[in-house]
Amino acid sequence: MEFLEYFTAPIIVFLVVVAPIWIIFHYKTKGKAAGGMSSNERLELDEMVEVANNMAVRIETLEAILDVESPDWREKQGT
C-alpha cells in the first residue's frame, strides 16, 4: 500500500505527459528513417517540380510578350 501511495503521482505524470510525447517522437523518427516517401513517390514529386518550373518559365515568357504587345494589360485584368 505504501508503494502505491508514494509512486502514484509520478506514474500519472509519466502516463499523461511523458508517454504520449515519447510515442509521438518514436514514430516521427521512424518516419524520417524510412525516408517518408517511397522511391515512386519521390520520382513523381520530382516530375511535378520540373513541370511547375517549366510552367513558371512559360508564364514569365507570356507576361513579357504581353508587356510588349499591350503594356497596360495588367490594369485591364481587374476590370
Image (tube, rainbow, N blue to C red):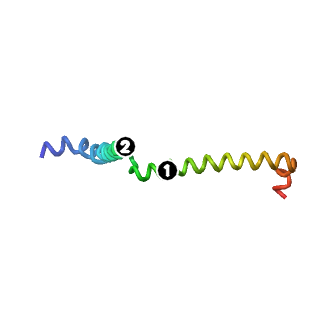
Quarter placement of the C terminus: bottom right
Question: Which residue occupies the foreground of this view, 65 or 20?
Answer: 65
SS class of the residue under badge 2? helix
CB under 8 Å between discs 1 and 2: no
Question: Which residue occupies the foreground of this view, 20 or 79?
Answer: 79
SS class of the residue under badge 1? helix
| Residue to which mark 1 is pinned | 45
* Category of crowding for the residue at label 2, using alpha-carbon neighbours closer than 10 angstroms: few (below 14), some (14–19), many (at least 20): few
Q: Residue at x 61, y 46 (%)?
A: 53
* Category of crowding for the residue at label 1, using alpha-carbon neighbours closer than 10 angstroms: few (below 14), some (14–19), many (at least 20): few
- The mark nearer the N terminus, 1 or 2, is 2
Q: Would you identify the image quadrant in which residue 11 lies?
A: top left
**Residue 31: where, in percent of width, then height?**
35, 46
Q: Residue at x 71, y 49 (%)?
A: 59
**Residue 48: where, in percent of width, then height?**
54, 51
57 to the left or right of 66? left
Q: Residue at x 60, y 49 (%)?
A: 52
Q: Would you identify the image quadrant in which residue 6 lies?
A: top left
The amino acid sitting under disc 2 is Lys
27 to the left or right of 42? left
| Residue to which mark 2 is pinned | 32
Question: Which residue occupies the foreground of this view, 13 or 21?
Answer: 21
The amino acid sitting under disc 1 is Leu
Count of numbered labels shown in the rendering: 2
Q: CA distance from mark 1 to mark 2?
A: 17 Å
